[in-house]
Image (cartoon, helix red, strand yellow):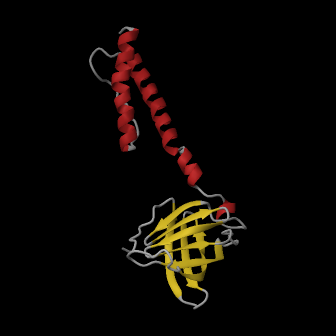
Amino acid sequence: MSHHIQTRFTAVVVFPLVLLLFVQGGSCRSSSGGASGRNNNNAANSRNTNNADAASVNAVRTSPSPTQTKETPNVKEVGAGGTVPAGEWGGAHVGLTVTASGGRIEFDCAHGSIDGKLSLDAEGRFSVAGSFVKERGGPVRIDEKPDSSPARYSGRVEGKKMTLTLVLTDSGEDLGTFTLTRGESPHLTKCL
């Protein structure tokens, strides 16, 4: 078999096997024998190539992607004096944009601000003052005063999950606890 035919044979036979392994996550097994006209050297070369390709596929499968590495918060971000990671956090009926100095929060029929850095204690907990503004459906007059109240936002971060509790500090009213996920879009139904 000439070098050209051997190369084509390897490309035609080995590549689909590697692709099949990658899709199914199986292992490569060579069988002895094969098509007529193939000698023992070609079969041995094919087995060696398959083993090397299978090792490459396994290395690709186990290597973390750049996205996984970026998304994984380090210890300082989730506790031991760190801060809540900046960016978008979302969940049912709530969306939070964390910045270096605080954050903006949206609810179905309200919005608010977090007026201080979201520092975490050793257990990943935070508690920060802010404001809460009730919204209503329909048109808003230019001279209408917003229905704003002082609020306390407290909660806990564990990895990419956050629990957030909102309490109005002037009345003591607890407006509920929400679950948010880092990088997830909020699921809001705004007032009409």
Given residues 29 and 101, the one toward you in this image is 101
* Residue 64 visible in the snapshot: no
Q: Picture coordinates of residue 132 (x, y %)?
A: 55, 78
**Most distant residue in the right direction:** 81
**Most distant residue in the left direction:** 36
Residue 42 falls in image quadrant:
top left
Q: Picture coordinates of residue 130 (x, y %)?
A: 62, 76
Q: Is residue 177 above or below residue 67?
A: below
Quadrant (top left/top right/bottom left/bottom right) for the N terminus: top left
Q: Is residue 24 above or below residue 19?
A: below
100 on left or right of 135:
right
Q: Picture coordinates of residue 76 (x, y %)?
A: 69, 61
**Most distant residue in the top direction:** 2
Given residues 86 and 155, the one toward you in this image is 86
Q: Is residue 67 above or below residue 157?
A: above
Q: Picture coordinates of residue 50 (x, y %)?
A: 43, 29
* Residue displayed at 61% across by 58% down: 73
The number of numbered badges drawn on the structure is 0
**Most distant residue in the front direction:** 143
Given residues 143 and 171, the one toward you in this image is 143
* Residue displayed at 54% across by 48% down: 67
Residue 188 falls in image quadrant:
bottom left
Given residues 91 and 6, the one toward you in this image is 91
* Residue displayed at 57% across by 68% down: 104
Residue 125 falls in image quadrant:
bottom right
* Residue displayed at 35% across by 37% down: 20
* Residue 65 visible in the snapshot: yes
Quadrant (top left/top right/bottom left/bottom right) for the C terminus: bottom left
